[in-house]
Amino acid sequence: MTRSLVIAPQWIGDAVMTEPLLRRLRHRGEDLTVGAVPWVAPVYRAMPEVGRVIEFPFQHGGLQFGARRRLARDLEGHFDAAYVLPNSLKSALLPFLASIPKRIGYLGEARVGLLTHRLKNPANKPPMVAFYSALSGDRDGLEQDRPRLHVPRVEVEAALQAHGLQERGYVVFAPGAEFGPSKRWPDKHYAALAASLDVPIVLLGSGKDREVADRIVQGAPSARCLNLAGQTKLEQAFALIAGAQAMASNDSGLMHVAAALAVPQVALFGSSSPLHTPPLNDRAQVVWLKDDPTYQPPLDCAPCFQRECPLGHHRCLEDVAPQRVAQLLRQSASSA
């Protein structure tokens, strides 16, 4: 059996979108160990095909060569192949320093000598699931792959009990977006949506999203809101999403988690594109004004993939009405 080390991306959404690749590798008999930073590691623990998860002691930014060399010494001789999922130079260093014989990844950041099997980066932005799955060397069915995560039933029940919630009796909001404000539906719209729903609202996100979630709660005083942004571990957030009636979110990591758990959802896209990072879920409703022929004037500026609106109007999300999202949420929940 081939012993394979997978170097994971550093974003939750990207990590979810690597699951079809790992499923392909496991199906052909590879024994998988995933190396991931601590805030992404729980994603891989929710993938049954992963045998082991190593938490890397690395932070965002910086080469941290000494730490990589020390870890490489511990890993040397334990793996036959490595799949380097990020495109950075530093992500390819560890398999090289650990003398792993076969090192697969995309060309990028002058790392030709660090990889033994190199794929050319596509000229256009392809769907990310297919982008990662192509590292398996397969070419069939990449577009049809859908990420899957598994949350044990006992964890869902524990999360519901801890917060006094009834299964399928609440809606989750994920109002944050790590990339920047251009991907966030306005707080006032989330507040109006909360006020229009007749079920409790659970707000999830990181500590950075706490202030945004507070503003939503304050803007909807009549709604029953439970603000858990920054108050849960990622595994607990997964369990709360798995037990929800539906979820409304921006294009974010938790959006992909809901899709991989097959939870009814409404996904709001603005500066980014659902052609590149769609929620691969039959129960997903995507709102993207760029693709709406009835929206005038057309959004010629989208997708800009910028952290902040370069034109200063943020029409791509500002003009998505809460009433529209509420209707889609009800449709998604009723079809579950």
Image (cartoon, rainbow, N blue to C red):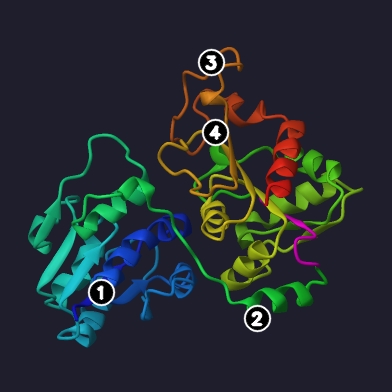
Instruction: Say which amino acid is labelled 2.
Output: Val
Q: Residues within 10 Å of mark 1 (few under 14, many from 20)?
A: many
Instruction: Say which amino acid is labelled 3.
Output: Pro
Q: Nearer the viewer, residue 52 or 260?
A: 260
For image coordinates 36% across by 81% down, the residue present is 51
For image coordinates 60% across by 61% down, the residue present is 206
**In this rendering, would 316 be left or right of 52?**
right
Q: Name the mark nearer the viewer: 2 or 3.
A: 2
Q: Nearer the viewer, residue 256 or 180?
A: 256
Q: Earlier in the sequence, mark 4 or mark 2?
A: 2
Q: Earlier in the sequence, mark 3 or mark 1?
A: 1
Residue for badge 1: 5
Please provide percent x and percent y for residue 168.
Answer: 75, 61
Q: Name the mark nearer the viewer: 2 or 1.
A: 2
Q: Earlier in the sequence, mark 2 or mark 3?
A: 2
Q: What's the magenta region? A: 166-174
Instruction: Say which amino acid is labelled 4.
Output: Gly
Depicted 90 relative to depicted 72: above or below: above
**In this rendering, would 315 be left or right of 120?**
right
Mark 1 residue element: strand
Instruction: Say which amino acid is labelled 1.
Output: Leu
> Looking at the figure, which quarter contains the N terminus?
bottom left
Q: Earlier in the sequence, mark 3 or mark 4?
A: 4
Mark 2 residue element: helix
Tell me the tag on residue 154.
Answer: 2
Q: Are marks 2 and 1 in contact (CB under 8 Å)?
A: no
